[in-house]
Image (cartoon, grey):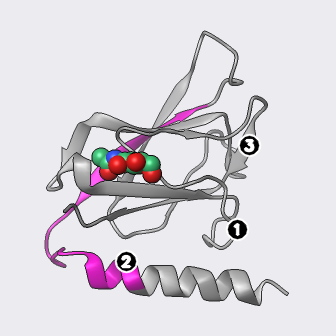
């Protein structure tokens, strides 16, 4: 059914783990601003979500616990705990298990534009990419 998507995710996670010079006893994190207004709304509303590096993080914008209706995801350039923000890349997923992609990869210079309506996002994974 979704086996190819699951396989792709596992391969992605395996290569992420190999490429990430992180230590278990140190907390590495960034913050993603989840814009919850429609894309053309000038009065953007954002929900900051703290995201630990290499850790799929469930996000919820309200008490129903069913994810976030979002138009844009922005990696906050001012918040980076034990990481160089310029080496971080993130992806959002439609499901809490991180199987169904909900955005293109995004980083501090390129936010993820989801839709002029609102795309639904349930989890975010951020990881370190090599910078050569
Ligand atoms: C961010 O992503 C864009 C598009 O993938 C890429 O061209 C750019 O080099 C990336 N920037 C950083 C700081 O990694």
Give the spatial CA distance, label 3 vs label 2: 25 Å
Residue under numbered circle 3: 119
The quadrant of the image that shows the N terminus is: bottom right
Relative to 131, does residue 18 appear above or below in the rendering? below
Q: Residue at x 51, y 58 (%)?
A: 91
Q: Quadrant of residue 94?
A: bottom right
Q: Which residues are magenta?
A: 15-35
Sequence-wise, the earlier of marks 3 and 2 is 2
Are there few (<14), some (14-19), or many (20+) residues within 10 Å of tag 1? Answer: some
**Looking at the rendered structure, which numbered label has been put on residue 40?**
none
Query: In the image, residue 83 lies at what x, y percent?
Result: 18, 55
The quadrant of the image that shows the C terminus is: bottom left
Query: In the image, residue 40 lies at what x, y percent?
Result: 70, 17
Q: Is mark 2 within 8 Å of ligand 1?
A: no
Look at the numbered disc 3 and give the secondary structure of its residue.
strand
Q: Residue at x 35, y 41 (%)?
A: 108
Are there few (<14), some (14-19), or many (20+) residues within 10 Å of tag 2? Answer: some
- Tell whether label 2 touches label 3 (CB within 8 Å): no
Q: Residue at x 24, y 48 (%)?
A: 86
Residue under numbered circle 2: 16
Sequence-wise, the earlier of marks 1 and 3 is 1
Query: In the image, residue 77 lies at what x, y percent?
Result: 28, 35
Are there few (<14), some (14-19), or many (20+) residues within 10 Å of tag 3? Answer: some
Relative to 126, does residue 12 appear above or below in the rendering? below
Look at the numbered disc 2 and give the secondary structure of its residue.
helix
């Amino acid at each position: 059914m979704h086996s190819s998507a699951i396989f792709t995710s596992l391969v992605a996670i395996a290569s992420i783990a190999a490429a990430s010079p992180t230590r278990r006893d140190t907390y590495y994190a960034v913050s993603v601003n989840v814009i919850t207004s429609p894309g053309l709304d000038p009065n953007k509303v954002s929900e900051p979500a703290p995201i630990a590096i290499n850790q799929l993080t469930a996000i919820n914008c309200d008490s129903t616990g069913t994810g976030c209706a979002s138009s844009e995801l922005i990696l906050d350039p001012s918040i980076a705990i034990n990481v160089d923000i310029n080496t971080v890349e993130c992806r959002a997923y439609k499901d809490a298990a991180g199987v169904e992609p909900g955005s293109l990869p995004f980083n501090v210079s390129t936010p993820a534009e989801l839709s002029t309506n609102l795309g639904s996002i349930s989890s975010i994974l951020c990881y370190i990419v090599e910078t050569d």
